[in-house]
Image (cartoon, rainbow, N blue to C red):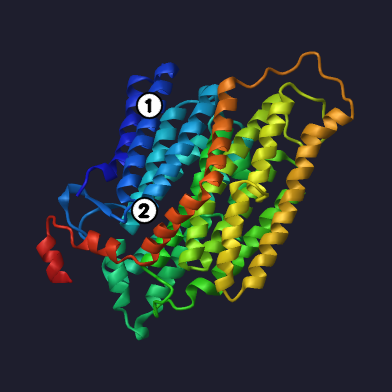
Amino acid sequence: MTHWVIMPVVLPAILAPFIILAARYHMGIQRVFSVAGVLALIAIALGLAVQTSDGTVMLYQLGDWAAPFGIVLVGDRLSTMMVLLMAVLALFVLLYAIGSKWDERGRHFHVLFQLQLMGIAGAFLTGDLFNLFVFFEVLLIASYGLMIHAGGNTRLRAGVQYVLFNLLGSTLFLFALGALYAETGTLNMADLAQRVQLIGADATVGIRVAAVLLILVFAIKAAIVPLHFWLPSSYAEAPAPVAALFAIMTKVGAYAIMRVYTLIFPVDLEVTAGLHGTWLLPVAMLSLAVGAIGVLAAKKLDRLVAFAVISSMGMVMVAVAMFTQESIASALYYIVHSTLAAAALFLIVDLVRQSRGHLELVTDAPVKGAALIAALFMVAAIAITGLPPLSGFVGKLMVLNAAFDDGLTAWVWSFVLVSSLLSVVGFARAGSVLFWKAQSDGAPVPEAGRPMPSTLSFVAVGGLLVLLGVHTVLAGPMYRYTTATAAQLVSPDTYISTVLDAPGKLSDAKAGDH
């Protein structure tokens, strides 16, 4: 057992109360500890990713209680990769929040930020479904506080809608957990993987209900159509750094689907046969289309980016829904790309807001720094729409290639290509209106121009775009890594044996029970 696995959860959990107790009225000290904490989190996550890169599964038993009786955290290639992605994203988001002074516009930004990181990291690392629910609630509470940061009636209404919809998901989650526990007597994921296999074909009703409820809950978190209604308003109205951090939130839902429906309910499981492919792939393709149409029809830049997130999640879920090793590998590559691209776009939206004073897609006077902001927008738009040469194009090629093994190849290719075309047109229209038409119309520059965004803000956005470039250049090694990760995911024997065979308190009782 290693203690490092719990550190991504413990570190922000310690920092949050420390900041509120020791540095409540000292913004400079809050910033120092918050940045230092995120840097330490990156170092820990990188160390965990390196340790698990050879296929090792790391286990932490809280109180040294053996599974399935005790709470366990599990670090494998997938969970550590997602924690590392979260930590790297958090650094650039935090730098932008400091540079733009968003953290000064409300109370307890850094405290809530750390609690949000704690909830996301816990969701990725937990080996227990009930504790996945607990971490979902932690990140829900923190995300609501972050969403209404700086106040405003519009932001408050969007926050209430966000909370109510996610509370509905939490209620369904509890129902699913109750049904699972009633059928199996456990909620440990590794233990569930074994016990569900023992359920006979004549006793599948309860377990199928639980499986359907779980996939509905995770679909809400992943904003899959038609359960996506909470996302456009919530992400558009949230403060820019918060919306950028939320780019990883929908990936929590995708992660949960990949974890649960390869470990507990794999495609070859007779009890839940047909559950995966019956409707998940069609609604994923529908999400692609709805997101792209939303991009094309958007009248404000923040809404346009929010619908681009829905479309990108549709792309991720198209790959996941095929549930092959190749498709999951392409989904993991695309998850990294879409998280970085969406976060960069939300921050660029805020740069545009600072420069123009509004986000309406209408012709306006040119603004200071428009050339630099336009360049950043163009790179991010190329990335999110999947145009060459950036990682979005590479990721879509991976997904399309994986679709050759699926019976719906023609449908997948049609939806992906048409949706990409609509997104390209939508982003091209937005960029033309925001940055080109203002110059070509010869509108006069206002005498009292708005101040330029801070250098640190541009550094944060530029850093995310540089990471996208690195993700493109290293596409080969990254795809090999995600392929090995997908192989470990679809063959979870090592995961199960590491969790259930580890020594600890009540290990003898556990052995007798099995």
- Residue closest to the eye, 398 or 421: 398
Residue 454 visible in the snapshot: yes
Q: Residues within 10 Å of mark 1 (few under 14, many from 20)?
A: some
Q: Position of residue 49 (x, y in %)?
A: 35, 46
Identify which residue is drawn at 20% across, 59% down: 69
Callout 1: SS: helix
Identify which residue is drawn at 44% across, 18% down: 27
Residue 239 visible in the snapshot: no
Q: Position of residue 239 (x, y in %)?
A: 58, 33
Q: Position of residue 163 (x, y in %)?
A: 51, 46
State whether residue 124 is above or below residue 152.
below
State whether residue 350 is above or below residue 249.
above
The residue under label 2 is which amino acid type?
Answer: Arg
- Decide which of tag 2 and tag 1 comes sooner along the chain: 1
Q: Position of residue 152 (x, y in %)?
A: 61, 31
Q: CA distance from mark 2 to mark 1?
A: 25 Å
The residue under label 1 is which amino acid type?
Answer: Ala
Q: Residues within 10 Å of mark 2 (few under 14, many from 20)?
A: many
Read off the residue under disc 2: 77
**Residue 225: quadrant of the picture:** bottom right
- Residue closest to the eye, 440 or 16: 440
Read off the residue under disc 1: 36
> In the displayed structure, does residue 281 sit left or right of residue 491?
right
Identify which residue is drawn at 40% across, 78% down: 205
- Residue closest to the eye, 229 or 503: 503
Q: Nearer the viewer, mark 2 or mark 1?
A: 2
State whether residue 133 is above or below residue 455.
below
Identify which residue is drawn at 72% across, 60% down: 418
Circles 2 and 1: CB atoms closer than 8 Å = no
Callout 2: SS: helix
